[in-house]
Each structure stands twice: as structure tokens, then as C-alpha cells.
Amino acid sequence: MAGKLPTYAFFKGTIVPFSEAKISVMTHALNYGTGCFEGIRAYWNDQEEQLFVFRMREHYERFLNSMRLLLMQTPYTADDLCQITIELLRREGYREDAYIRPLAYKADEIIGVRLHGLQDEIAIFAVPFGLYVENDQGAHATFSSWRRISDNAIPARGKITGAYINSAFAKSEALLNGYDEAIVLNENGHVAEGSAENIFIVRDGVLITPPVTENILEGITRKTVIELAHEELGIETVERPIDRTECYLADEAFFVGTGVQIVAITRIDHRPVGTGQMGPIVRALRDLYFTIVRGKVAKYRHWCTPVYEPEATSTLSQARQPALGTRS
Ligand code: PY5
């Protein structure tokens, strides 16, 4: 995933050259993981020569919720953060798919673990971005020996930086053992999710995914897939706990997430899932998803925020200009 660095970043209330967006080694969030973040994709549409940010407002609403869990304060609303993001992307001028990373962090340079009474900062940057899981035609997954963090230890529904140690343990174990991705069980032994993506299985033509009380991130792609399956394919999703061996017996299985998009799981622990090839439901969902995210389906165009359209400029002109600082 090493790639090009951004040219700019939103940092301490203004857009600055990326090289100036630097923090101290004493930063609280670096020492204790007291931060939270988002991952948002923007898709380039060649015909329209337009960059579309996918479900940006929902991502910022979740971001503000993660911040609330960490007792963080911010003057910015979800709409403010959307406008700042559009401005940042326009500065970058990307004409390719990109990934946007908003980050909120406890910025104090002090010793002492706590959440309250600290200075909170927000940074945002965006990089060009392709595939997150290499094997997107059919991943080989394994059940991790690590358990998913639970709500009374570190809430999985918050996208908390420190919590990603749990994901990193699971992901490295899976990759170092020759698999593409991990499936992580929660402390009850039920399926929670992948290392950084939600999971669905298909049994008897019905989609099944763990409910939000199973220590999962309340994924935006998960919500998108449930809606598209219902609306476009007439397939319902049952949200209920999933046992490990149901995955072995599933007709189809797949990961969903902003980074991973939709990836078929075609083998789990050396067992073929269904036929061992990408199945018809995941294929149909992928086709729909990849068309919709590029703003090509009118019905779902409201999920896609254009970066370069004149409308975007006029919304921006009413935005918090002072906060943007270096606007020319
Ligand atoms: N579960 C976890 C633990 C995640 O980190 C993510 C997203 C998801 C589920 C899927 O959520 P959504 O559909 O809202 O993106 N992970 C980030 C991503 O951009 C971080 C990856 C490094 O996909």
C-alpha cells in the first residue's frame, strides 16, 4: 500500500502543505492510541471527468460519534468536515480513485492516560488508492486465533486508533500464514468481522450478517449492501449471530468495507466456500456497487458528492472560509 504522499493536509484548522502537518513524539494519541479516524473513498468517473466522494456525510457522522466515545470536543459539524474535504480534494486535483483519511487525536504533549481534559485536534489527508485486499476475485480467509475486542473493553463501534492493534494482530497472523484475510470471532465465539471489514454469508438465498451488538464496526458499506440487496436484488438480510461452522457451509461469503469494497471469500481454512468460485449474489452486488460508487446510477447519485462541479464551489463559498486559512 506504499504510494504517493499527499500534497496538502487539513491540520490545526487550515489546509497546509503536507510536509508541515507534523506532530510531536510526545503526542498523547501516539503514546496511548487516543484517537479515532475514518476511511472514505472517492471514485473517479472518466466520462463525466468528475470525482465522487461516497457517502461522505455518513462517514463524518460516524467520525463525530467515535469522537464522542473518546470525550472529544470539536467546533466542526459533519457538514463543515464535508466542505473541508471537498476543498482539500480540489487542491489535490486528483483525477483517479482516492482514499480520504480524517483523523481526530488527543494532541497534548503530556504523560498520563485519560480521555478528559485534553486538547483534541482534527487532521484530514487524501491519497490515490487502489485495491486494499490483493486477491479481490476470491480471497482465502482463515479464522483468527485472536478475538475481537469487546464493547466493555474497547468499543468496536467506534473507529478508535488504539483498537486497530487488534486488527493488526489478526491481519498479520493471517497474511504470515499465507491467507489473504482473517475472520475474527468475538469473545462469545460468534463471527464478528474481518480485520478491517464487515462480513456476510449466503445460506439458502438469504444474506446473513452479524448484528451491531456482536462487537462489529457499524459499517457504511454493510448498510449499503443490505439496502442494495433488498432494493435491487430482492434479497433480504438477516442480522443474527453467526457460528464459525456456518461459514464453512455457506453457499457464498464476502467481505465489505470502504477499503476492501466487496470481496468474495472463496475459501476458508482450505475449504471451498460453495463452489470455490465467486458466487452469483456477490458478483451481482459487486457489479451494482462499482457502478453506483462512480455516480453512474441516478437512483443512488445522492450518495455521491461531486468534488469538481460548480455546485460544489457555490456550497463552498458559504463555508467556513476562515477555517480553511490558505484558500487562494
Ligand atoms: N470493520 C472494521 C473493523 C473496519 O475497520 C472497517 C473499515 C469496516 C468494518 C467497514 O466499514 P465501512 O464500510 O464503514 O468502511 N475499515 C477502514 C476502511 O477504510 C480502514 C481500513 C484500514 O475500510
Image (cartoon, rainbow, N blue to C red):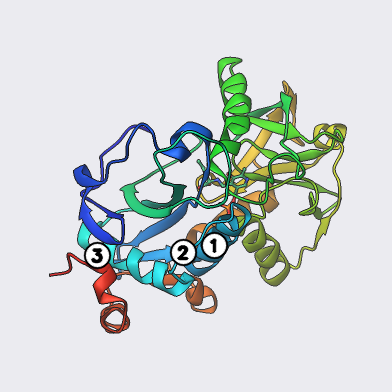
Mark 3 vs mark 1, foreground winner is: 1
Q: Identify the element where label 1 is drawn.
A: helix
Gap between marks 2 and 1, in whole Å? 9 Å
Gap between marks 2 and 3, in whole Å? 24 Å
- Residue 176 has which mark? none
Q: Amino acid at mark 2?
A: Thr
Of mark 3 and mark 1, the one earlier in the sequence is 1
Question: In which quarter of the view is residue 62 placed?
Answer: bottom right
Q: Position of residue 222 (x, y in %)?
A: 66, 56
- Residue 64 has which mark? 1
Is label 2 in contact with label 1 (beta carbons under 8 Å)? yes
In this image, 17 relative to 113: left or right?
left
Can residue 137 be seen in this snapshot? no
Residue linked to disc 2: 74
Q: Residues within 10 Å of mark 1 (few under 14, many from 20)?
A: many
* Front position in the image: 86 or 111: 111
Residue linked to disc 3: 90
Q: Amino acid at mark 3?
A: Arg
Q: Position of residue 267 (x, y in %)?
A: 69, 29
Q: Residues within 10 Å of mark 2 (few under 14, many from 20)?
A: few
